[in-house]
Amino acid sequence: QLQASGGGLVQAGGSLNLSCAVSGRDIYAMAWLRQAPGKEREFVARILWRGSKTYYADFVEGRFTISKDNAKNTLYLQMNALKPEDTAVYYCAADTRGRLSRYGTDYDYWGQGTQVTVSS
């Protein structure tokens, strides 16, 4: 139901725009989470699917913007000023129960992930 794309290799300071094709019903919110090698999965950003309210992890520091196009059923994550520590597999995830959580276990559907690698 979720298909993430747009990852790649970029130099520090560069930008990437991730996309997630969304299908399915009863989605309350969509989020991006990421997992770096050897680290726990962590929350990145969230947006209400039928609204516009967004929420970001502290480490984003204004560098990332989550957005959506409901007409295209697509979720985006525009990432600017990328740092080597942003290197991770990025996942889009759907919240169908309104939990509005930072924890991956509270999301019901996941995309397959897209690799983002930032070189120094």
Image: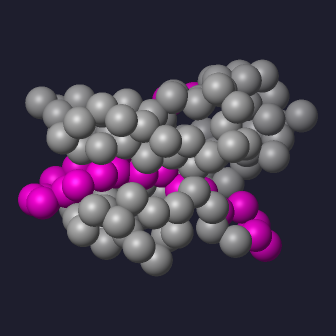
| In this rendering, position of residue 48 left or right of residue 93 | left
With respect to residue 49, does 33 lie above or below? below
Task: State the residue at coordinates (46%, 77%).
Answer: 105
Quarter of the image for residue 15 reads top right
| Residue that appears at 24% across and 68% down | 97
Residue at 65% from the left image edge and 27% from the top image edge:
63
The image position of residue 95, as x and y in percent, is 31, 62
Check the picture and name the quadrant holding the C terminus.
Answer: top right
User: Where is 49 relative to 98, above or below?
Assistant: above
Q: Residue at x 49, y 70 (%)?
A: 104
Q: Position of residue 72 (x, y in %)?
A: 16, 32
Residue 22 x %, y %: 23, 49
Say left or right for 73 vs 17: left
Q: Quadrant of the N terminus?
A: bottom left
Magenta-tinted stretch: 16-39
Out of 105 and 77, give the one closest to the viewer. 105
Tell me, yes or no, whether the highlighted magenta stretch contains residue 24.
yes
| Residue 57 on the magenta span | no
Is residue 114 at all visible to an observer of this figure? no
- Report which quarter residue 54 is drawn in: top left
